[in-house]
Image (spheres, rainbow, N blue to C red):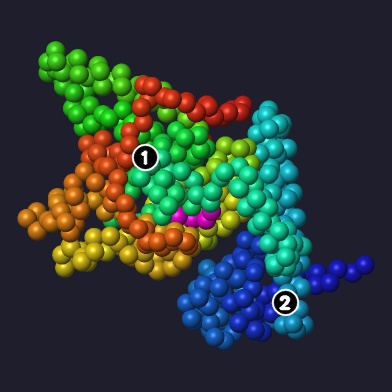
Amino acid sequence: MTTPFPDRERTFLGICLLDLSALDRTKIRPEHLVRDRHAVLLRHMLDLRRAGRLESPDELAYSIVSSRQLEEDVGGLGYATGHADSAPTVEVLPYVERLILEDYHRRQIRGAAARAQGRIQEGDSARSVDAQLRADLDGVRDVGEDLCEPASSIGEAVWKRQDERLRSGRTAYIRSGWRSWDDAEDGQGWSSEGVTMIVARSGMGKTSFVNSTAVLMAASGTRVVVHGTETSRQARVDAMAYGVSGIDPRRYHWLTRLRGEGRARPQDEEELEELARLHHQALAWLGTLPLRVSGAGLTVEAMAAEVSRLHHADLCDVLLVDYLQDFVVSVGVKVGERVVQVGHASATLKALSSRLGIPILVAAQMSDEKETARSGPPPDPFPEMHQIQWSSGAHQDAEEIYALNRGEYWRDRLGQAYRPDRHGHPGVLEVQSRKRRSGRLVRWELTWDGPTRWVGPRPQIGRPTAPPPRPETHEGEEAGAW
């Protein structure tokens, strides 16, 4: 039997040349195409279309001949514009798209199987290989699956989930570890679905907030994964240990320096020994928690793949990201296009949460520091959700948004102009809800310990009432890390 559209990639590109508006609604992306010259041409056409500079085939031809390298990469101007000869009619676009996606998914499945076979030959455990294979296949969407379902079947699924929650006593929220928030009817903790964004100015305490949240949630038995885009995993766990033990890291480092220079007094030596003991105790306690930490250097796609693997291995109930704007630039995004990268990262996290059914808490930085420095403090010290740095639409991907404010931040910057009743009191981190799917927009206060960078109650690591189980590790894995 003859295969329809044997050169389906050229047919697809030809349809796009005949009807440039097809670029606005197509599901095909450059990575779906096999031949490099076709992928380069499609990426160039999509870039021009997004920039509003592709309204006719003549504009495409001019842009190709304007760059010798581009002309070589697409196979020459004649080859690029000749795709139109392979397109019988624009009405066959949905069918051709389906054929291309089926080819792409077959390649993805073969690749996943080959990687699994390679890991087995290298001696990896069957359970570890199975979890990775599930994560790989989870990213391959079934093209035969209907994108729309009847309301009746969706309603049945919703009721089944709700019935399970009613019988188990679980809710649509997960406990944060802060009783003032968890036990309030207007609070109840973090949303158990979708993306929750934590927005704050640079230096306000986003990282400390994420660290404290991760530790308190893990201490309650929740399996937590923390991804830091700007710090190493060792530095983050070290900061967590300082916060848990109540140690001022500056004091600890100063005493260590005095010892190294031979200037430490007997009382300094005694204090240093006690701080070292507390620090070691905190690190050991953190090692008992179902907590995993990653560091900088990953693209959002690499992080999503690893979280998928951990989720399928029952090692991840919630993901915390610190922070949105600092992921490594993804393939296909040009260096310097920060707005595109942030939007891409936000959309990827939203899709990951929907696919795995886990909540994701994302710290995001606001973008008005220069304006604040020029015009003075804003009327409202809490950032608005549309002020997320390098993005005008990331807030639309979030189910809930919370803004942070801290009195010391304004006291140190405003001097005599600082007003506690307006800018916040020292020793307090205020959290203001800016967007919620249900419930009132409320504000609550958490204790803030500046020297140790800790938010909220400090866990009693010396006398735990119910120590959480140590997370299961598989062969070749390190506990508490990726």
Quadrant the N terminus occupies: bottom right
User: Mark 1 falls on what kind of element?
Assistant: helix
Residue 472 rendering spot, x and y as whole percentages: 58, 28
Tell me, yes or no, whether the highlighted magenta stretch contains residue 235: no
| Side of 94 relative to 472 (left or right) | right
Q: Callout 2, which amino acid?
A: Leu
Residue 241 in which image quadrant: top left
Q: Callout 1: 10 Å neighbours few (<14), some, many (20+)?
A: many
185 w.r.t. 5: above or below: above
> Residue 212 got which mark?
1
Name the residue at 53% across, 82% down: 54
Q: Which residue lies furthest to the top in this view?
A: 266
Magenta-colored stretch includes residue 193: yes
C-alpha span from label 2 to label 1: 51 Å
Which quadrant of the figure has residue 91? bottom right
The span shown in magenta is: 192-197
Between 25 and 123, the one lying in front of the other is 25
Q: As rendered, which of 235 and 274 lies closer to the eye?
A: 274
Q: Which of marks 2 and 1 is nearer the N terminus?
A: 2
Q: Residue at x 66, y 39 (%)?
A: 131
Q: What residue is at 13 percent from the left and 56 percent from the top?
A: 419
Would you call the spot at circle 2 few (<14 residues within 10 Å), some (14-19), or many (20 or more)? some
Q: Report which residue position mark 2 lands on.
A: 93
Q: Is residue 279 visible?
A: yes
Is residue 471 placed above or below 447 in the rendered structure? above
